[in-house]
Amino acid sequence: MQQYFQMKAQHPDAILLFRVGDFYETFGEDAIKAAKALAITLTSRNNGGNDIELAGFPYHSLNTYLPRLVRAGYRVAICEQLEKPSPEKKIVKRGVTEVVTPGVTTDENLLDQNTNNFLAAVFFGKKDKAGIAFLDISTGEFLVSEGDLSYVDKLLQGFQPSEVVFSKGKADFFETTYGNRFYTFALDDWVFTEDYTREKLLEHFQVNSLKGFGVEKMELAQIAAGAALHYVATTENKNLQHISRISRLHQDKYVWLDRFTIKNLELTFAQNEEGVPLISVLDKTVSPMGGRLLKKWVLLPLTSLKEIENRQDTVEFFLKNEEI
């Protein structure tokens, strides 16, 4: 069990799925949580004279049980056997190969193909100003903005991130300001320092300046974006080359809808079982990318008449040229 406890100490905030032969095992508090969330048997085993809770499932059932744990709101660390067992070695080498969270996953079993799976990072600055970043590692979309607290609230409602990260020192402030509507995770305060986060961005994009992305002077947004990249790195996601650009959200480009408007207009969710939200009526898309784009258009209405007319012209073109 020593090896297990070493791995668990590295991921205290996650349920650790510990590979043992043909099974993934959980122990202690993790086992209690897993047994309840997955409706699997909770047993116990002797550990140096003391019993410890145990719950597990076959390794080939990972695609069934992992989504259920994440949807239940748990971070999950997957610890694999990194070598084949042999008679010569009593302890098999193991290591955490992936940490899956509600906002950080590329697993198709966890994703709704017609909806972005955004991770949001929020940095609170001075004078009630904040920077915010939205990152979807499944599509590579990386968006940033900054403004007052009410503007950030509208962004959170519009993008509906699956997970929000912020500094531990601002955990109470976040809940007081935005409530407990989101799955959240608090990072160490040092992650949200200007020098560190800027270096993360420059290193990731292999540039010396962020001017080319139009975010060079957005210090609060840069800190949030760098913190998002840091968080993703802690989940053992190494292949992030597809995140090739970072884009600025312009505050005056959209009509920002608050959560009450989105709810009362039933834009994406009906308020009763018999109801049909607007997106269900409009969505005739045939691809996941189209579905995501349409939902974004519904939640972020344009303010520019010219841009609205450009969209209409594009739709008209395809209606008149159905063979394309």
Image (cartoon, rainbow, N blue to C red):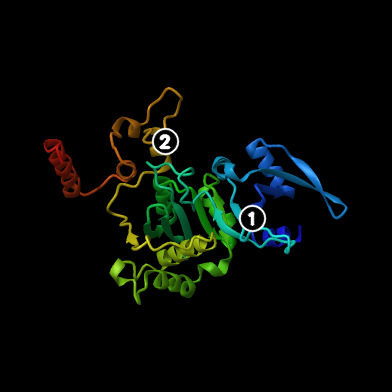
Residue 97 in view, yes or no = yes
Q: Nearer the viewer, mark 1 or mark 2?
A: 1
- The answer for how far apart the CA atoms under marks 1 and 2 are is 32 Å
Question: In the picture provided, is 281 more to the left or to the right than 166?
Answer: left
Question: In the picture provided, is 179 more to the left or to the right than 84?
Answer: left
Residue 4 placement: quadrant: bottom right
Q: Horizontal and vertical percent for residue 210?
A: 34, 71
Q: Amino acid at mark 2?
A: Lys
Q: Nearer the viewer, residue 23 or 279?
A: 23
Residue that badge 1 annotates: 13
Quadrant of the frame with the C terminus: top left
Which numbered circle lies on residue 48?
Answer: none
Residue 124 in view, yes or no = no
Q: Horizontal and vertical percent for residue 23?
A: 66, 46
Q: Nearer the viewer, residue 109 or 122?
A: 109
Q: Horizontal and vertical percent for residue 78?
A: 60, 54
Residue that badge 2 annotates: 263
User: Is residue 280 depicted above or below 154 in this figure?
Assistant: above
Residue 142 placement: quadrant: bottom left
Q: Amino acid at mark 1?
A: Asp
Q: Residue furthest front?
A: 87
Sequence-first disc among 1 and 2: 1
Q: Residue furthest bottom?
A: 208
